[in-house]
Amino acid sequence: MPKQLRFSVLVLPNVPWPELLRRCRQVEELGFDSVGLADHLVDWAGGKGPWFELWSQLSAIAQATTRIRLATLVAQIPLRNPVLFALQALTADHISGGRLDVGLGTGLEIDPSYRMMGIENWDAKERVARFGEYVEVVERLLSQEETSFQGRFYKVDAAALRPRPVQSPRPPIIIAAMGPVMLGHAARHADIWNSISFAKTFEAQLDETRRRVAAIDKRCAAVGRDPASLRRSYLMFDPTARSSGGTIKYYESEETFRQMVEQVIALGISEVGFYYPILEQQTPMFERIARNVLPGLRAAYK
């Protein structure tokens, strides 16, 4: 593998706060490298349970953990001005002692957050067009002493965020990208490219991701970037979980997990992400996998 293999867990904030904090601590104790935190106003998939705000929960989790990296997976650009976002990221970088990964994406048009908040729900084309300016503003603010920017959508006038980030020159930037233009943004700006496939079968997901890996390599070459310099992150989504009552296939057994993850790694993915178990009865297998399978995978792909 061109980069050290890492494993992350997406912990959705749809449980009471004590349980959410317990899960994040558990993910750290089990040896995972990163915990991902989602960014919505409410559960966009229709759940009626709790839902906590991204930066507030991340800062609290940072205080309750010591080692694990914390990723916004991913923050959606319609919800915040990019300068405010950069300041929130800078603050969280200091609170966490330099353990922040800054994940950004366009957000979802079907998310009810925009209607509830009374803000404009940009169409997909505008989201992608805005994204390039947004991430450039954030990157500059976190990297430079002072930033001015005049774009089509965003303007920044001599903005200076202090102190400078703990991480040098800035926290790593994750860009969630699947379409051609967003892949171009990732090739230009990302330290980590993140993707997910919603295809209906695991085989179709692998095929779709294989094509995207080839596409991001071409995008990197087009902007003069060594493709090997871009870490590739993939979140494993189980399209059958909802119809099966919440059972996630890759938590069926240690061997099932190993076989599925090895196929993902073979695509050139160096960071594999998983959902925290939906069903309590799959938690023991989740724990066994962390203890018994992940160390062997790390050793095999050094």
Image (tube, grey):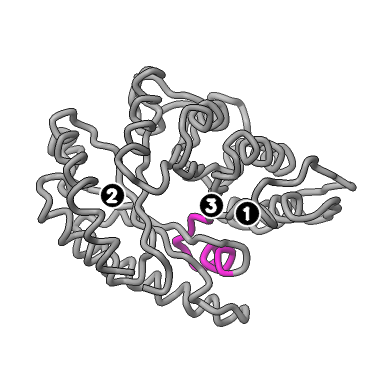
Checking the image for residue 237, the label placed there is 2
Q: CA distance from mark 1 to mark 2?
A: 24 Å
Please indicate whether residue 218 sits to the left or right of residue 259 in the image.
right
Q: Quadrant of residue 205?
A: bottom left
Sequence-wise, the earlier of marks 1 and 3 is 3
Whether tag 1 and tag 3 are in contact, CB under 8 A, the answer is no
Q: Is residue 96 magenta?
A: no
Q: CA distance from mark 2 to mark 3?
A: 22 Å
Q: Position of residue 93 (x, y in %)?
A: 62, 41
Q: Residue at x 40, y 28 (%)?
A: 13
Q: CA distance from mark 1 to mark 3?
A: 11 Å
Checking the image for residue 131, the label placed there is 1
Q: Secondary structure at mark 2?
A: loop
Q: Position of residue 40 (x, y in %)?
A: 49, 33
Q: Position of residue 124 (x, y in %)?
A: 53, 52
Please indicate whether residue 49 sits to the left or right of residue 289 in the image.
right
Q: Residue 106 or 272: which is nearer the viewer?
A: 272
Q: Quadrant of residue 99?
A: top right
User: Comparing marks 1 and 2, which lies closer to the viewer?
Assistant: 2
Q: Residue 230 or 114: which is nearer the viewer?
A: 230
Magenta-colored span: 175-187
Q: Residue 6 or 17: which is nearer the viewer?
A: 6
Which residue corresponds to mark 3? 124
Residue type indicated by callout 3: Ala
Q: Residue 208 or 251: which is nearer the viewer?
A: 251
Numbered circles on residues, count = 3
Q: Residue at x 19, y 34 (%)?
A: 283
Sequence-wise, the earlier of marks 2 and 3 is 3
